[in-house]
Image (tube, rainbow, N blue to C red):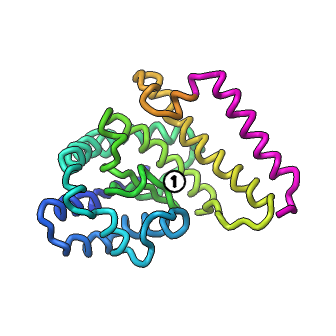
Amino acid sequence: MNFTYDFSFVELAIKFLETGDTEYLRKISELEAADHIFNHAVRYTCNVPKGSKLELVSHLLTPIYECRKELPQVIRNLDFAKEHILKTRKAEKIVLQYLPKDFIFSSSFFFTFGYDIGVAYGNNCSLNLAHPHFSGNMNEMIYYAIHEMHHAGFITLQNGYMPSLEMSVRKDVAHLIEDATHLEGMGTYAPLSIREQEDTMDNDRDYIALQNQRLMDDLIKEYFDIYYYFKDNPDEC
């Protein structure tokens, strides 16, 4: 196994929020973790600045008086992540059960502040330790680490291929649906067993939905109606 766990982004974010020294923002913007979320933002995210990494980082950590409210929770989450994700490598071991037997990670896992709940880009992935979802049950960090790690593993197997949002005809949309279905489907499936074992199926809306067969039947029908609308008319705009 060769997964590198990188806490530098969130650790520098904590120092910035504790001191107000904007030099920490510059330091964060020069990290590999900042490259990771910036590249993801440029490709997929509409509601954040994309002019530069420093602009994005500054956006995520301001207004400072609001972000400071998250400090106690973020520090607690950081300690938990180091103890239960880094030291045990529990998430990593679970993910490897859902990848080819000879698969070896060559990836970085970045722990960030303020960007999404977690994202994968290229071979790497990240988790936002300031996300409110983790305030209820810290084990959710393990489950979401599994989710994002699987994305990183699958993208690695695809030689870095990432789904494209550039679409001109219906077959492009069908391809996007196929890609997203596999990525998010496996990202959701990989932590399913541990959620069942730890009786935390009711902590996340995806798993709440999975327990409601009537809802799932309706969603499956809606899914295939949408999918075949694009799949069966590939060359139409």
Residue 97 versus residue 37 in the image, above or below: above
5 left or right of 25 in image: right
Residues rendered magenta in the picture: 210-237
x, y percent for residue 172? 76, 61
Please state the horizontal and vertical placement of residue 147, each as a whole percent of the image. Answer: 49, 43
Q: Residue extending furthest left?
A: 19
Q: Is residue 61 magenta?
A: no
Q: Nearer the viewer, residue 192 or 91?
A: 192
Identified at 33% across, 70% down, the residue is: 31
Place of residue 194 in the rendered image (x, y in percent of width and height, measured from the top left): 45, 28
Tag 1 secondary structure: helix
In the image, residue 227 lies in the stretch drawn in magenta: yes
> Is residue 179 rendered to the left or right of residue 117?
right
> Which residue shows up at 49% across the image and 56% down it?
120
In terms of image quadrants, where is residue 218? Answer: top right
Q: Amino acid at mark 1?
A: Ala
How many labels, in total?
A: 1
* Residue 21 at x, y percent in the picture: 15, 71
Q: Residue furthest bottom?
A: 51
Neighbour class for label 1 at 10 Å: few (<14), some, many (≥20)? many
* Residue to which mark 1 is pinned: 152
